[in-house]
Amino acid sequence: MKTLSACLLLGILVGCQKSEEAGLPAASSGPSAGSSAPAAAAPAETASPAAEAAPSAAAPATPAPAEPAPSSTAPASFKDGRSESIASAVGLGCEAKSLDGWLELLCRKKNGTGGHPVRAVIQDPSPEAAAEKPSEPVAADGAGQDPDAGPSNEVRADERGELRLVVPLRAGAKQTVTLEWTDTRYELQIDGTNAKLDWAGSVVSHRRACQTLLDENRARISDAQKLEGPEKISAAEATRLPKFGVCQPAGLGSWALSLTRFAGAGEGAARALAFDIEVVRIDLEGKRSAAPLGTIEVAPGGLAISALNVYDFDDDGNDELIVPYELNALAAGAKPAAPSPIWTFSNGAVSAYSKAPSTSGGLGIEHLDHDMRPDLGSYGPFVAWLGADCGVKSCPSRVTGPKFYFHSAQDGSFSATDAAATAALGRACGQKPAAIVVTTGGGVNVAQTAKNLVCARALGAARDALASELAAKRADLCGGAATCALSSTFEAWLDAALPAELGSAAKR
């Protein structure tokens, strides 16, 4: 039996060796490159002695079908093409597809920051790409681009404002294409079957200028921790700061917020951090322009600045800067700052955007519809910062009504009273509340009471009725005292101007 097993094993090994020498494919040890999972193992079968003795008699393996050769002519349509994922393409309003060794990049009439595609300029094509002229943009009726539209290495947006670029995408292809929008510029890099989009700001001069700005802000925060007395910033205070000096890419440059001065003041409840902030624009060559945002004084941890956002609101080819912020806590006696929420860059200078709405207490970025334009939300006059003795047992550092909304219009302005803005306010407020002052567990729900009061006003509730309810609940609002800061705040809100109204249904 041992002799027979040894002979069988020897026969198998000799058979495999002869198969490889004859050029037949050897068995695979795992899934092929195009396989998504390993194949199931085939059931073992008993080999006949004849098969072992004559492996050369086995049927030759069927060769796999060869991949179709890339076409030397670009497809007229990429309808049946494969979707390609290229970083940044979606944000630029572009869709990428490949078919028969070609790539189509179709950029719609507006990108994510409001810019419109202008043209694509093909740079230094490879010999293969130069020999195969990319197809011209195809109109809806199938007609090609006007032959007089421009040089052969340039493809311009069509009459619908869309840009269609077709270039080789196959082994050996190398291509650089500069893509221009009204507000930005990218380079499409083709290397064989790989494609990527590089922002024009990814150049040494721009990167160095942004790094220098970041280093300056880090140094300023570090220096503030070396001051003496109340001006000194503690390590705990420094860890709760917004990100200053960080560049936000914006078209043909970057925006950033930078500290020009940073120090502390006061102690205890009067402790404040003072920020002198400027709005900075850095162009692609690294040149810096700036304008003062203003001085903001808050309690430690009281300033929050979310990620900066950009959009070309006025369609002038320069992205405006949106500064989302919240003033969550003020030091005792401090006055709230009201920085401009939007900034623009024009004629080489940074300035506040003249069509921006007035905000107070904070600013949030909203999207009230599907037009891709950022809308804004803020509190109007209905925001107040309260001390520890505001009236109720647990006083919040800030109390606000609901946000009012500012809908971005095509002309670059904002409206708090159009259909989109008032619909958003209506969703925030809902029905007129049955009661203004909300008590829970023996105390007052300050946040819900503030919202109820402002929403009732927006819904058209009579002022006298609201004043009577506040007076009747003053003892709850003030912890039994005759008057308090919380009660006085709500009474002042009865006469504050509403940025928008929802109607008079509550009066009926």
Image (tube, rainbow, N blue to C red):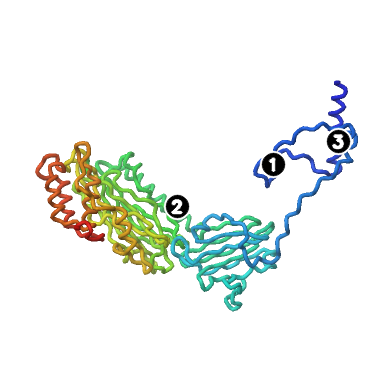
Q: Residue furthest bottom?
A: 148
**Residue 499 seen in render:** no
Query: What residue is disc 3 on?
Result: 15
Residue at which label 1 appears: 31
Q: Answer with left or right where residue 343 lies relative to residue 264.
A: right
Left/right placement of residue 291 relative to residue 136 reads left
Residue 473 x %, y %: 14, 45
Q: Tell me the number on the disc at residue 211.
A: 2
Q: Amino acid at mark 3?
A: Gly
Counting from the top left corner in percent of width and height, residue 277 is at 32, 54
Q: Badge 1, how many Cα within 10 Å: few under 14, some, many 20+?
A: few
The Cα atoms of the two marked residues, 2 and 1, are separated by 46 Å
Q: Position of residue 494 (x, y in %)?
A: 17, 55
The numbered mark, 3 or 2, whose residue comes first in the sequence reads 3
Determine whether the residue tagged by mark 1 lies in a helix, strand or loop. loop
Q: Which residue extends farthest top?
A: 1
